[in-house]
Amino acid sequence: MIQQIIFVDGTIIKVANINADGIYYQGAQRDSLEIQLAKGAIAFDALDALTSDSTKTNRLTIVTQDGDAQTQEFYDHYVLRTALTLKPITITPATADAAAVTEDRLCITLAQLTYTEVQQATQAAEIADMQAAIAALAFGGEA
């Protein structure tokens, strides 16, 4: 199985693993995605810049290729980056006969806006549009 994540700006990154979970962040319970990338999949600074820009993470597309079958899933409003780390991930747990196998991975956790936050942003944009239209009418221009 091969997974890729596509950001709004068209950036495509191969993903090692994605975990969906809930998280309490900024005073609200939210859905979150922990996206794990192989250490060399993208430079840390580039990943930092990409995931800190909410316009690029507002709509994420996860493409999964499993044999001949390909699926796409869309995730909207995952704009709050709560973590960006390089950490060891256990690939194979320890047994009585062998030590655990770990791999260093880049891990990004993105949290989703709540319904209320999405509605507030929509209303703020509508108010700004109305204010621009009123200003244009007041000064004889077009909105």
Image (cartoon, rainbow, N blue to C red):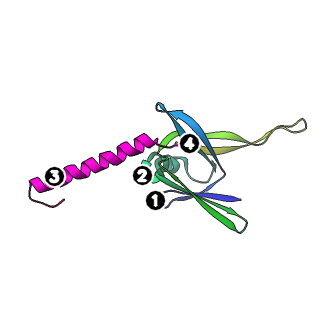
What secondary structure is found at the residue carrying circle 4?
Answer: strand
Where is mark 3, residue-wise? 134
Mark 4 vs mark 2: which is more N-terminal?
Answer: 4
Mark 3 vs mark 2: which is more N-terminal?
Answer: 2
Compared to 26, does 133 lie above or below?
below
Where is mark 4, residue-wise? 32
| Highlighted magenta segment, given as a residue range | 111-140
Question: Which is more toward the observer, 16 or 70?
Answer: 70
Calculate the distance from the C-alpha at mark 3 to the C-alpha at mark 4: 39 Å
Calculate the distance from the C-alpha at mark 3 to the C-alpha at mark 2: 27 Å
Q: In this rendering, which labeled residue sits more in front, label 1 or label 3?
A: 3
Q: Is residue 95 left or right of residue 58?
A: right
Q: Is residue 58 left or right of residue 135?
A: right
What secondary structure is found at the residue carrying circle 3?
Answer: helix
Q: In this rendering, which labeled residue sits more in front, label 4 or label 2?
A: 4
Q: Is residue 101 left or right of residue 11?
A: right
Quadrant of the frame with the N terminus: bottom right
What secondary structure is found at the residue carrying circle 2?
Answer: helix
Where is mark 1, residue-wise? 9
- Tell me the residue at 63%/62% (across/down): 71
Q: Are marks 3 and 4 in contact (CB under 8 Å)?
A: no
Calculate the distance from the C-alpha at mark 4 to the C-alpha at mark 2: 17 Å
10 Å crowding of disc 2: few (<14), some (14-19), many (20+):
some
